[in-house]
Structures are given as structure tokens and as C-alpha cells.
Amino acid sequence: MRAEQGRGRVIIEGVKPEIDGGRFPIKRTVGERVIVEADIFAEGHDVLAGVLRYRHEANPEWSETPLEFVVNDRWRAAFAVTRLGRYHYCLEAWVDRFKTWRRDLRKKVDAGQDGAIDLLVGAELIEATSRRSSGPDATTLRERAAALRSDRPSDPSGRIRVALADDLALLVARYPDRRFATTYGKELHVVVDQERARFSTWYEMFPRSCAPEPGVHGTFKDCEERLPYVAEMGFDVLYFPPIHPIGRTHRKGKNNSPVAGPDDPGSPWAIGSGEGGHKAVHPQLGTLDDFRRLLAKARAYGIEIALDIAFQCSPDHPYVKEHPESFRWRPDGTIQYAENPPKKYEDIYPFEFETEDWQQLWDELRSIVLFWIDQGVRIFRVDNPHTKPFRFWAWVIDTIKRDHPDVIFLAEAFTRPKVMYELAKLGFAQSYTYFAWRNTKEELTQYFNELYQTEAREYFRANLWPNTPDILTDYLQSGGRTAFMIRFVLAATLGANYGIYGPAFELCEHRAREPGSEEYLDSEKYEIKHWDITRSDSLREFITRVNRIRRENPALQNNGGLRFHAVDNEQLLCFSKGTEDQANVILVVVNLSPHYTHAGWVELDLDALGLARERAYQVHDLLNNARYLWHGPRNYVELNPHTVPASIFRVRRRIRTERDFDYYL
Amino acid sequence: MRAEQGRGRVIIEGVKPEIDGGRFPIKRTVGERVIVEADIFAEGHDVLAGVLRYRHEANPEWSETPLEFVVNDRWRAAFAVTRLGRYHYCLEAWVDRFKTWRRDLRKKVDAGQDGAIDLLVGAELIEATSRRSSGPDATTLRERAAALRSDRPSDPSGRIRVALADDLALLVARYPDRRFATTYGKELHVVVDQERARFSTWYEMFPRSCAPEPGVHGTFKDCEERLPYVAEMGFDVLYFPPIHPIGRTHRKGKNNSPVAGPDDPGSPWAIGSGEGGHKAVHPQLGTLDDFRRLLAKARAYGIEIALDIAFQCSPDHPYVKEHPESFRWRPDGTIQYAENPPKKYEDIYPFEFETEDWQQLWDELRSIVLFWIDQGVRIFRVDNPHTKPFRFWAWVIDTIKRDHPDVIFLAEAFTRPKVMYELAKLGFAQSYTYFAWRNTKEELTQYFNELYQTEAREYFRANLWPNTPDILTDYLQSGGRTAFMIRFVLAATLGANYGIYGPAFELCEHRAREPGSEEYLDSEKYEIKHWDITRSDSLREFITRVNRIRRENPALQNNGGLRFHAVDNEQLLCFSKGTEDQANVILVVVNLSPHYTHAGWVELDLDALGLARERAYQVHDLLNNARYLWHGPRNYVELNPHTVPASIFRVRRRIRTERDFDYYL
């Protein structure tokens, strides 16, 4: 035991946020705050003091901010993260002899006791402080110590005033005695991502379906033409399924037929052919130059292009010949294709991560991501990451983000909850969720409370998708256009990150391949589609309006402030989101039934909305511009799904000045 | 990264029990089980296997027991602790290729697929297993592998039967391929105490008040005479306040008067005089030999004597001269006495744990405990441990228990919850609680659910005291003899460990020094008392009966099985305790009002009681021997506090055989 340790008295425990004992970092985006809490206490009743220490990984110097006492031995402090990359944070606390002495002296004086000896004790403490300081502070401290020791004025009450003076306390607090301080035993980490990790609006689109006329294979150039359409709707991430050459062996035909016709384009996820593998572009889409130009054009529209990382091969992939050791060989000399018995996926070879040459495999796969980063891509949607080892992803993401801290990975894992959480912990910036299958009020409330009100909020960033090329839910199949609107509003307001697979979504494509299936009829995965994006029943305008509301209201750009409010009707869901300072508060009411008008009384948690119980306030429906004057927690709502199935209210505290004039006249 | 690590695929997380990331051990007593759970999963859908590993610290060899799958990636295993001291436990898990192969083969066969190549894959796995085995097992495995490879019978279904045979699966499971296994990153610890740490019945008594006639200072010999009285009531720990010489300087008089009369004996907690310090015996009590004889006699009655460890000194303590550096000196050359401004305790000098010579102080204080261990003491009640540094206690307890694993320390800390929990974490085997101040149904339910249903149950062993020499609660002051019975039943049934300060308790001493105070009038702390233990209104018989019920019912010897049950009357508290196997189940109903008869309907959680919904059962009141036939969850209870304010039911499942005959006739 070090000499000081026997004299150290402070315990620091129960630190939050801290994921799995500090094994995993928490996540923030540039500009956000990290609020840190801990149980801090010592034996006895001495006064404690402490600091939260933090630094960016590139900065060897720690910054410090004082810990404030909250309640029941709980302390708190916060810091803002302003740079991409990794921050470290830690805690340090100590017994503050001077503060203890000062508190006790005050108590004694209040009780009419003589403080003569206490003044001498204080003088010693102040002198010791002066030795830790320098310059004018040291002089001042020495003078104060002398004043406490002096016998003039002979009445000690004058000296006690000097001893208890606030400026002395502030001065001493600048030079605390931290010799016996306790440092929390672990350094904890924050990964700081670009803002789109927290607030992003995704649009998934098959480039090959973007040609202006039917029956023609779309190109990156066609995609350029589609950019204004996507940008005007308010999307800022445009995600493409794999853009690589597609295998021919065991190619799937229309509607997942095991036999492809000569003109069937195949699934883009069957990656690799004689024309190249994961670092090549499917020739019918264009060239790598075309892709880079599209990327630049998209960026000019405020759109990032996200690519799909699907680590698997068609039997025709060049890796099969170049790296046979990266696959699992069967005793009959064939390669093990993907299977989930009794299902077989003979057009797909998974990589064999148990290979002895795993390091080569890891390096090669990472080089694929780096290749596309070199082309300018910064956002990746990773296909089925839960079928590759966790350690592999942890290594890939960690090593890539060291050099490219602005890169974001979205985990497309629809699997068991602990597996999904693990992927988020180890580094995926965003994660797909079970949102598509949460339809009732109870389901939605329970699920989003779990995602946003538990520790998961520190590392799991939900990205909500009402549909994907694989997921056409029963609800969308059966609820008509209104069902699409309902699910859209839920995704766009419950999720600071959300996405849709379009144009299927805005055109309300709802035909399933067969009853009970979530597969689309004539799925775009196996054929080129031509979508009439100009159709009058498109949700384009509705989507545009909601995305504008998202951009204009910071409350919707974060999930931390989510609160559900009671409504006495099971079909009405009511929740609010607010910024930390409650300057922007949004209240959403959704009719979950696509068929019938529903009405009910909401019972608002006024505290969560930053509203005083006794004052009226205005709710302004940003969807239809209607305004209502409400008062207290209980208010009536009614939603007809055949007009608009939701209200997105901006809550405005009623301020009685001329500025409100236009709202009320 | 080690070569194997890249091929390791299993994650082990969320291990329970694990206190503060493994910084603190959990606690058990000899013969108890440790049930360990963890989230264990890998990417993909392969079948996993794993073991819980454990060993006593004295045994370098690990034992292993297989982990069983529970639900939602949760796995569980258990081991029993059979020796005093410290156990280590850990987890290991791996992907089981053979089990995965077997499951998939079965699925394929069920789907009518050809398993020809799979048989060859299996043969390879079985051959690899044979290489990890030896002797007849290796031969058998080689033969099976050959059978799978053989082309006879030509119909593969016969070979598939061989492949899927249960005996083959069992044989292969004995030689798992653990090359790429994941070992949980931490070894966790269990401290195993003697049984009295979990189940003990304490009686606190001032030896000096044990003389047979009034006005005479009691002796250890008098205590010997009192042993049958204590033993017959059913107590197995007899705890003495400090037995050391008592200081004279600033000695307190009767009722804590600042001036003592010449005959006032002083507080036993003002330790040390010219006659010795913490390693000496107060001469009026007898000699060290007398004490050792008392210890031996007590043990013959099944009673352990517990001593009080109060690390503080009277101004007359020999340490003041011998170790002046162990105290805090003030600038006027005096020693700082204990104070909690504006209160002063001039008869007590605390030790200065911030002394530069802290190591000497620590060693000396530990030597006090070791001295009494050498005399044969095994149980210590530690006075105000929350006013000495946590690190000091951790070191004292840890180093002492290494050589004396049967020693138990009880923490007498009535302070903030996190401080109390910390003392338990760092090694105190038992802890005083807030029980004395928890009177209402809501208070009791909330508090005991916190103590017994949260992680605290793993390290915090409550010891419930309805009174102490410092604590005479309002409830006892005002509720008469019935209040003492109520609080006694609650302590003795809610707490596997409990204690009373007697004879004040059984004689229902309820006079406070002044209104609003919890101090006794004419407190035994400052004077010698003479108690008439033969009084007819003594609770002696009631205590005896309840303690016999405790001894005869293992359900009351543990707190893990506590469940509260609803009653539709706020004054009636109903709870049950059961053994792990539910062979012994006790149901307690207490009328919390000492004044009025209360009745109500209990709504029992039948599952917690191990009762089937459709069968009748008997509840047998062990206090008055009454028996009732109940059915279903809802039953009527009525308790008149002026007869007995509680029922302690043994729940007997009604078994329709002649063995039940005597119950029902």
C-alpha cells in the first residue's frame, strides 16, 4: 500500500454513465453534454470536494470541473464534448479540511461557543494553503492567517468574521489539499460522433430502379437526377443496397425464384462476379468515377450517401479463388453455402471466421471499408452484423474510427435483444430496432421506455424504419395509405434517426408476396422496378412537411427527452420530447387506428413539458397550423385518420406580451 | 491479440452476482449455494456450451459444473460452498460445433433432406473429439466416426441414426473443443462465514448489572449464573458492551450528566484508565481468566460471547501517553476530543487516522482484535465503524479473516444508506439496520424489499434490533407491553439475525429520559441496574416460544425467501418465508397496532408459498397451536393485540394420506 493510501478516506462508487464496468464507451455527438454522477462519501461527517476530470484523447492535459452535491451522497458534474473522437473522463474527490473547519466554526459561533482555538486551527490550514499557492494569493493567505492569529481586535468576533469571509473561502478553494484524494479506479470513455449519428433522416433506394423509363437498368447518373426529389423531401442520408457486381451461379429470379431467367438482374446482396467483388462497381450502374461524382453532387444537396457492407460472397466472387482459406470447405471438396436448416442459400457463401488465417480475413474485410472511405463514403449500413464475430466488428470499427472519427456504422441486426445491444456497445453508431413490429400503445410505450429511459440510451442509438425491402409489416399491408402516414409520423417523431425504403414507402406499396409473408410481391430485391414518383396519392408532401418540422424543432433531434403521457383511449398515443433546457417542446398525439376517428382526454405530465400548473399555454399543431389554448394537464383531443391521423404540437408557454399578439387574434 | 482470440466468438456479460464490477465479494455461510447467471451468446445461431468454474482459495484446482440455458441468452449454474474462507468463481463458454452439427442434421433429416455430406462433416468432428480423448472413449469415438463414413448400410438413414444417438452426444460432450473458449474477464469471490453470520439470535447485556443483589457491581461470575436464563430463552450470541477499564477524566454521571459522582461507574464506552486499555478487563468485572472461563461456559450452552470493539479512548487511556501521534493535537497543546459541533464529547478522544504514522495505528488497533481472538472470542460488534476510514476496516477484516475465517464482525452504523452498504461490502458480516424506525406496513414492506430483493442481499446481512441501550423508540415508549411483542415478532421473523437489549426488552422498559428523546431514563450506560428478571409480566416465555419456532423452521433462518402478501387492512402486515425447496414455508401475520383488534382478508401469492391454486392447505399457528383449513389466495385473519398480536403459521400442503390424520381429526 502506498503511503498516502492509508490516509485516503473517500469512496467513489456507482458512477454513471459507465457501461459494463467501463468496458464500453458511451456515445455522444459533437456539442452534446456528458452528465456524470457518482456516490461519493467518507467516514464521519467531514465536508468533501471533488472534480470531474476529462480530456480529448488528442490532448494530454485534463480539464476539471467541480462536482456538485445532489442528494443522498450523490454528486454530479457535466462537460461538453466539442471534438470528434474519444474523450476520457474520471473522478477525483477528497476530504476538504478547510470547508469542514469553516462549517464547524460557524456552528460553534451560532451556538455561542468560544472559537479561540478554532481560529488557531484555521490559521494553520490557511498557512498550509498559502504554501500551495504563489504570488499575490500566497501573500493574501499569509495575511489572513496572521489576522486569525492576532490578538487584535481582542474581541475574537472580529477575527471570526475574517475567518468566515466568503472571499477567503473562495481563495482557499482554489488550492485544495489533494494529497489524500481518491481517484476513481477507472478511466471511462465517450465516443463522439458527427451530428448525423444522433439526428439523421434516411432514404433507401435501389439505384438500378432509377432509370427514367421502365425496363431500363438505372445508373448513378440517373440517381443524380433523383437527388432533388430526395433532398426536397428532407432526407439527408441516401442509402444504397450493394452496388457491386452480382454473381450468376444460383442467381435468384423474380420473387426469390430458385432459377433466374436470362434477364433477371439478381439480388445485389449476392456480391461478386468475374467483374469484381466488394471493391468494384456493378458495370450497369456506371463507373467508380460516376459514383464519386454522385457522392459530390449529393453532398451539395446536403445528402450523404450510405453504402451497404454485406460481408458475404456469391460463388463467383474473386475471393473464392484468391482466398479459399476464407471459406469453410466441406469433406466433398465444396464450399459450405449459407444455410439455416432446413433453409439453404446456395447463392451465398459466408466467410469462415474460424479460419486459421483469420488475421488475413479481418485485414481484407477492413480494407473494403477503407476502400469506400477513400472514395468519400462516411456512412455504412452493415448487413447482418450479428452473423459475424463481435470481436471482429469491435476491431474494425475501433481501428477505422481512430483515423476516421466521422465515420458512422448502422447495424442492420434484427435478432435477440442482447445481441443487438452488444453490437451497439462495441461501436455501431446506430442500430435498427423492433419498431416495425411495435404497433399498440402498450408495445410502443414499453419499447421506447426501454430504449430511451434505461442505460441503453447511453450507447444504443435507435434508427426507426417502418419498412425495408425485407419488411412489409401486416399493419402496412392492411391499413391503407393512412397506415403509412401513422407509421411515418411515429418513426419520424419517436426517432431522432429514422428511415424509409422508397419510393415503395411514399407510394404506399403494400402488396405482399403471399398472405402471412412480410416479403413484397415482385420485390425490388430480385428485379428492376419503375416507380411513378409523381403519383398524386404519394405521401411526398406529407413527408416533406414532417421532415421540415424535424429540422425546425431541436426537441425532435434527440431522444433523451421522450415522455409518454396518459390518454383515456387505447388507440391514442401521446408523447412529448423536449430539449434539455425545455426551450423547444413538442407534443405528439397519434391515432393508432388507420380506420376510425378516436377521441379522448390526455393527462399531461406538466413538469416534463416545462409548464406551470396554474398558467394557460398554447399548443400549435405544426401539421395543419391549428392552435389551441390549453390549461392544466387534462385536455381533449380528437383525430380523424382520414384527414390527418396525428397532431405534432409545438408547446408554447403563453407569455402575455405583444409578441403573442399574432397567435391569439 | 493472441492467436486464439481472433477466433473466439462467445460473449459473457451481465454476470450475477457481481458486486460493483467484482470489487467486492458476495457472502454465504457454509452449506449454502451460489447461483450464478450470465448473458452468454455468440454471433449467428450456433449452439453454445459453458461451465461455471469455482474453487476454494486453498485449493488450486478448479471444479466445473455445466451452465444451463434459461431464456433470452441467459445461462445459469450453481455450486455449494462447504468450507469457511474464500471461494473464487468464474465462467467459461464456447461454440459447440458438434451440438450445432447435430441440431442442424436433425432439422435437415426432419425436412427430408439428404444428410450424406453432413455425415462426413460429423465424422471429422467425432474424429477430432477422439484425438482429445484417450482409452476406450477414443476407440469408441473412432469407431463411430468410421461408421458415419462407411457406405454400409447404403441407406444413409441407418448411419444418421448412429450420428444422432444420445450416447454419442454424451460421449462427445465429455471432450469439448475449448480452444476458442471465452473466459469471463474477472474472477469473482464469495466469502464463506460460519452459520451464525446468517442465522443468529443476539442478547445484549451489561455484565456489571448482573449481580444477584441491587447496588453491587456485577462480575463475569455473575454472568455465568445468568447463562441458563439467556440460553433457555433461545439466544445463541450474548453481546457485552465494552468490558475494559473506564476513564475518570470528564466521566459522565447518571443520565449523561456532565459531572459524575464519586460512585458513578461511567460509560463503558469511555475506554481506558490507569488500569489498562482495550486489552485489559475492568477490574470490578473480574480477571481475564474469569472472562475465558465465562466464554467456555457460555459455549457449553451453545452461546457465543460477542465483544464490543469501540476504537476510541478516554483521556486516561494508556495510548494517550504511549502513542500521542495517534491523536489530533490542537495548536494549544491539547488533544482534540470528539465533537459534532456544537456538541462536545470531552470524555472521548477519537483516533487520528490521518496521522503520518497511520500504519502503526492500524497495526495496534488490529492487535486489539487479535488479542480477543486469542482469548477465544469469535464475534465482534463494532461500535460506530462509520467514523473510521473504510480502507482501515477493509484491511483489518480481510487480514484477520485470512487466519480466522470463522470470525464475524457486526457493524453498528446508524448512518446514511450508502455508508452502511459500503461497510457491508468491505467485509462486515452483519449490519444494524433502520428496522427500529420502520413501523408502518408501507415502511416495512419498502425497506425489507430493498434489503432482501435487491443486489444488497448478496452482501448486506441485516441484524434487526427493536431496542438498543441508545434506542428506545417512540413506538416502544407509547405502545405498552403489546408494542414490545409486535416489534419482537417482526424482528425475529423478518430477520434471520436479530437481537434485543435485555433485560430492558423482556421487562418492557419504556421510560424515556425526556419526551422526544430515544434515551432511556436512568440509562444503564451510566449506572448499574438491577433487573428483576423473574417478573410475571416478562416477555420471557413469549420470546422462548418464538425462538423455538425459529430453530425448528429453516424458513426463518434465511432472508432470501421473503415475500409480502396483500392484506386489505393497513394495520395488518402479512409476509412469508420459505426454504429454497419450499419444504418449509412460514406465513406471518402481524397486527401493527398495539391498541386495537384488526381483521382483514389476505390475498396470498400462492406460487411464493408453493401452493397449488386448486387444493386446500392447512395453516398451523405455531404461537397458539391453532390450525385452519384454507383454500385459494383469499383468507380471513383477525388479531387481537391484547392476546397475541401475531400469527406465525406453518403452511402445510394438505396431503390426503393417513399421515395427515392427526391434523384433521
Image (cartoon, coloured by chain):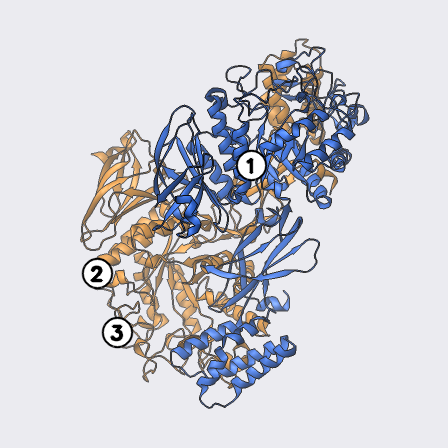
Chain colours: A blue, B orange
Identify the image quadrant of residue A266.
top right
Left or right: B327, with B222 as reference point: right
For marks 1 and 2, give the one nearer the viewer: 1
Q: Position of residue A626 (x, y in %)?
A: 42, 37
Q: Is residue A220 left or right of residue B106?
A: right
Q: Secondary structure at mark 3?
A: loop
Callout 3 amino acid: Glu
**What residue is pinned by disc 2?**
B480
Q: Is residue B345 visible?
A: no
In primary-sequence order, the first of circles 2 and 3 is 3
**Chain under numbered label 2:** B
Identify the residue at horizontal 50%, vertical 90% (top origin).
A151
Q: CA distance from mark 2 to mark 3?
A: 27 Å
Residue B570: percent from the left, percent from the top? Answer: 25, 48
- Which residue is labeled 1 in the image? A418
What residue would you read off at disc 3? B213
Amino acid type at image mark 1? Lys
